[in-house]
Image (cartoon, rainbow, N blue to C red):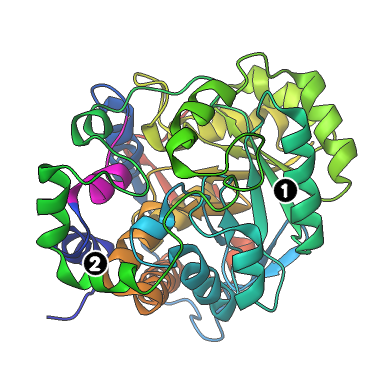
Amino acid sequence: MPSLEISDLKALAKRRVPKMFFDYADSGAWTEGTYRANEADYHKIKLRQRVLVDMTNRSLASTMIGQKVSMPVALSPTGLTGMQHADGEMLAAQAAEEFGVPFTLSTMSICSIEDVASVTTKPFWFQLYVMKDRDFVRNLIERAKAAKCSALVLTLDLQILGQRHKDLRNGLSAPPKFTPKHIWQMATRPGWCLKMMKTQRRGFGNIVGHAKNVSDLSSLSAWTAEQFDPKLSWDDVAWIKQLWGGPLILKGILDPEDARMAAKTGADAIIVSNHGGRQLDGAASSISMLPRIVDAVGGDIEIHIDGGIRSGQDILKAVALGARGTYIGRPFLYGLGASGKTGVRLALDILRKELDITMALCGKRDILDVDRDILDSDAGQLPR
């Protein structure tokens, strides 16, 4: 059966990726209430159906932080992407480049900055976690510059790691431990294992061999647990902005007051995000907070959104509510786990087709003309 929607790719990935890694992508913190709300709140927003309007010559082309995109979508930074499929970050970056949308590499990726740069021809974006070891932070930024990354995405909402029950129960690690449970999970996914055997990229490529006292994988988990900096402040944002010197995007804004503070930093954009429901369980969904943040700072800074997007209709709704760009994490991970680079491309194709057709049926031909006028304020519940 062909994969017609993101849920088809999810089902296929679940059959092909070992449980511990599939669960890593498909989970949230604590009760997963915010994780579920991220998706559910999009369904509450209803669209206006329009007829007898010219639907020819449609365009989804836009810009994000001044950079041209074929549609207002970027691939989110996701940790352990290379455990969904061998060389996952490299394959996803290639698919994004071919499609004409940005790929964002996570600090906690399996493939390194240099790995991704070696297989792409256009600049990608790099996501930074701030560690206590400031020399390592400087080194990461310099490596991103050397790779000609065209934007730095600074994550603000992971100073302390939220508890994700599935990861603890699964004993998640990269590379996986060779316990009977883990061996069984991998043995039942022979295709995944064969691909993993053909690559040397099975640890955290941006960290091992670069961070102090991390020369092998045995010390990595302890290092990361100790290194995320709970003292991260707005002063650090200014320091990183100066050190980077290029386009800066601040990820993890979920409150209008924080949005106003972010706008004062001189960053190029903010991402309305609750880390995919993986940090503060019980927080509001990203889409429900988007209109309030747009009202607070929409005239001062470019606004993007991350979390809960599973269809092209979701993308259109976010754009209508004021997002200049949207980010997909799980949809591309499902595609990657299902079919590698081809699956990522298919995920993007699915979203583009849904976005294009929905926009037309709402009476619009150009994504740049989409605004709240396409939303039905009398049906369902519009975020306030």
Position of residue 317 in the picture relative to residue 43 (left or right): right
Residue nearest the observer in this picture, 143 or 150: 143
Position of residue 355 in the picture relative to residue 152 (left or right): left
Residue at the image point whose x is 16% and y is 69% from the top: 190
Residue at the image point whose x is 47% and y is 31% from the top: 274
Residue at the image point whose x is 71% and y is 27% from the top: 133
Which span is picked out in magenta? 19-28
Kindly indicate the quadrant of the structure image that contains residue 121.
bottom right
Is residue 373 something that shows in the picture?
no
Answer above or below: position of 1 versus 123.
below
Circle 1 sits in a helix, a strand or a loop, which is it?
strand
Position of residue 261 in the picture relative to residue 186 (left or right): right
**Quick one: quadrant of the N terminus?**
bottom left
Position of residue 194 in the picture relative to residue 131 (left or right): left
For the residue marked with disc 2, what is the amino acid? Cys
| Residue 22, magenta (yes or no) | yes
Q: Residues within 10 Å of mark 1 (few under 14, many from 20)?
A: many
Q: Looking at the image, is mark 1 or mark 2 earlier in the sequence?
A: 1
Residue nearest the observer in this picture, 208 or 126: 208
Image mark for residue 193: 2
Image mark for residue 152: 1
Is residue 274 something that shows in the picture?
yes
Kindly indicate the quadrant of the structure image that contains residue 167.
top left
At which x and y percent is residue 260?
73, 23
At which x and y percent is residue 8?
19, 66
For the residue marked with disc 1, what is the amino acid? Leu
